[in-house]
Amino acid sequence: MDIKLNNKKTSIASCTLQELAQEMSLPEKGIAVAINNQMIPRTEWINTPITEGADIVIIKAACGG
Amino acid sequence: MLQFISHYTEQYSYLDSIRIALQGGCRWIQLRMKDASNDEVRPIAIEALQMCKNVGATFIIDDRVELVKEIGADGVHLGKNDMPINEARKVLGESFIIGGTANTFEDVKAHYEASANYIGCGPFRFTTTKKNLSPVLGLDGYRNIINQMRDADIHLPIIAIGGITAEDIPAIIQTGINGIALSSTILRAANPIEEMKRIINITKP
């Protein structure tokens, strides 16, 4: 599905934030994620669905993305 | 996204202010104690970090790169007069978030190239909290910077900062800004926890 990732239109395969973290190989530390402007703690990633057109912001220390 | 910048009043200490923000649902805290020494900041930072960990909130400290590394905070926010971002990156390595304050697109670009992970962009309007001389940006300033970032293919999360009140938030989010940093406006409310909840609701699309 298509989402907005850090203000850029992006196509992803994941249906939850947990899956997206794996898809993007997000690190364990130094990361903050928000969907539609709401910060989502890591413990809630597994139960957080991603819907078409979601506005996702990922702040992460490692380069790229 | 809402970043709460710790603050104190006659009524509330730094830690009180962080507790209030977390209880109100904020999950991104910046500890800012500009005129204190590292030894004064350390015990407060350690307790604040634990409070954030308990609820899965992100915890960053203003300036004080070494302290961030020492206690294992999530990252650091660097203002214009703090350590340069590329130097901080050398100290911290790749596993810490580094945010930088920007007033212009040129600042944003420089921070991006120096490996910043997010931008705090402001001031939105004149503020007495921070005695800086940078020109206020307003909504047009944000629109311009967001457009220039898009044109330059710089996709870095950017939050607005400086003199923002709850009523300003919808229009700021409309410009393409990803989030807001707030400080004194929360503690000034009659019920700060409820005010935090209200503001988080406002940031929802």
Image (cartoon, coloured by chain):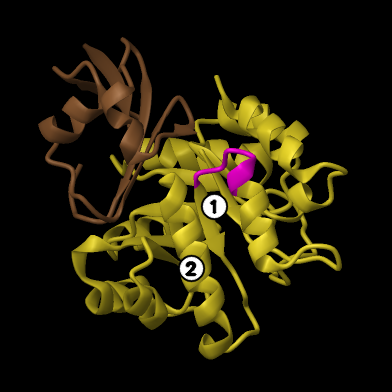
Chain colours: A brown, B yellow
SS at circle 1: strand
Q: Are marks 2 and 1 on the same chain?
A: yes
Query: Is residue A55 or residue B136 the one in the foreground?
Result: A55
Which stretch did the figure color magenta? B22-27
Q: Is residue B150 left or right of residue B178?
A: left
| Label 2 or label 1, whichever comes before in sequence order | 2
Residue at mark 1:
B121
Q: Quadrant of the N terminus of chain A?
A: top left
Visible in this render: residue B37? yes
Residue at 36%, 60% in the rendered image: B74
Quadrant of the image occupied by residue A65: top left
Residue at mark 2:
B61
Q: Position of residue A45 (x, y in %)?
A: 30, 30
Residue at 31%, 17% in the rendered image: A49
Chain ID at mark 2: B
Residue at 36%, 62% in the rendered image: B110
Visible in this render: residue B62? no
Per the model, the C-alpha gap separating discs 2 and 1 is 17 Å
Chain ID at mark 1: B
Which amino acid type corresponds to the residue marked 2 in the rendered image? Ile
Majority secondary structure of magenta residues = loop
SS at circle 2: strand
Count the marks. Answer: 2
Which amino acid type corresponds to the residue marked 1 in the rendered image? Cys
